[in-house]
Image (cartoon, rainbow, N blue to C red):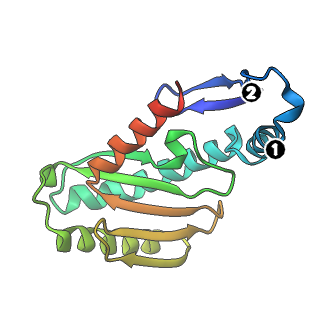
């Protein structure tokens, strides 16, 4: 039995595993047992999740001012990916999605997203964040990737990737039966 975090409801939930119920012979299901033991050892625990939330909150404080000073209406910062869908391990990164209301449409210009991410990178550095291995990656969904110096957590930030948020929720729902 394990305890997992329901990120969307912000509560801890109990996770149970039932071994091969077809044979009712649990000793033959060694692969399932090994996978379950691995899950118990490596799955994201509350301490790791708490560190990620603290990191998210410190980023919000710094970046919110940048958005408002530049005429961008900051709406929300969502945790997405494995941290939110329940598949995270203790080594997993944190994926963050900034939703900016000025770009709340499907025709968001990729160059503007890249500009926002580069600006965020500079704002964080100017405010004392020590970003290890920082880079803005020009991909289909542009991201700012860095390793937070304090928590040693890899961070990936994107702008207005609503599909990623929806997919996170979908995988979360699939995994909960």
Q: Nearer the viewer, mark 2 or mark 1?
A: 2
Of labels 2 and 1, earlier in sequence is: 2
User: Residue 87 vs residue 135: left or right?
Assistant: right
In what quadrant of the picture does the N terminus appear? top right
Q: Secondary structure at mark 1?
A: helix
Give above or below for 168 relative to 23. Answer: below
Image quadrant in which you'd find residue 71: bottom left
Give above or below for 115 relative to 168. Answer: below
Q: Nearer the viewer, residue 75 or 111?
A: 111
The residue that mark 1 highlights is: 34
User: Residue 68 vs residue 144: left or right?
Assistant: left
* Residue at 80% across, 20% down: 24
Q: Nearer the viewer, residue 143 or 101?
A: 143
Image quadrant in which you'd find residue 39: top right
* Residue at 37% across, 44% down: 167
Q: Secondary structure at mark 2?
A: loop
Would you say the residues marked 2 and 1 are in contact, meaning their CB atoms lie under 8 Å apart? no
Q: Nearer the viewer, residue 176 or 114?
A: 176
Q: In this rendering, does residue 129 appear at all?
A: no
Q: Nearer the viewer, residue 62 or 111?
A: 111
Q: In this rendering, does residue 27 appear at all?
A: yes
User: Residue 105 vs residue 124: left or right?
Assistant: left
**Residue at the right extreme, as displayed:** 27
The residue that mark 2 highlights is: 20
For disc 1, the neighbor class at 10 Å (few under 14, some 14 to 19, many from 20) is few
Q: Position of residue 131 (x, y in %)?
A: 53, 73
Q: Position of residue 135 (x, y in %)?
A: 44, 78
């Amino acid at each position: 039995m394990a305890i997992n975090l329901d990120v969307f409801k912000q509560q801890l939930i109990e996770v149970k595993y039932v071994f091969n119920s077809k044979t009712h012979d649990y000793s033959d299901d060694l692969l399932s047992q090994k996978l379950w033991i691995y899950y118990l050892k490596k799955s994201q625990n509350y301490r790791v999740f708490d560190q990620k939330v603290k990191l998210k909150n410190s980023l919000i404080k710094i970046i919110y001012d940048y958005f408002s000073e530049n005429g961008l209406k900051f709406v929300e910062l969502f945790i997405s990916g494995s941290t939110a869908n329940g598949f995270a391990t203790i080594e997993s990164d944190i994926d963050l999605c900034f939703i900016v209301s000025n770009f709340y449409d499907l025709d968001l210009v990729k160059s503007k997203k890249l500009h926002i991410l580069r600006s965020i990178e500079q704002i964080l550095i100017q405010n004392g964040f020590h970003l290890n291995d920082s880079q803005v990656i020009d991909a289909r969904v542009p991201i700012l990737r860095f390793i937070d110096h304090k928590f040693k957590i890899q961070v990936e930030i994107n702008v207005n990737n609503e599909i990623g948020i929806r997919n996170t929720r979908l995988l979360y729902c699939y995994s909960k039966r």
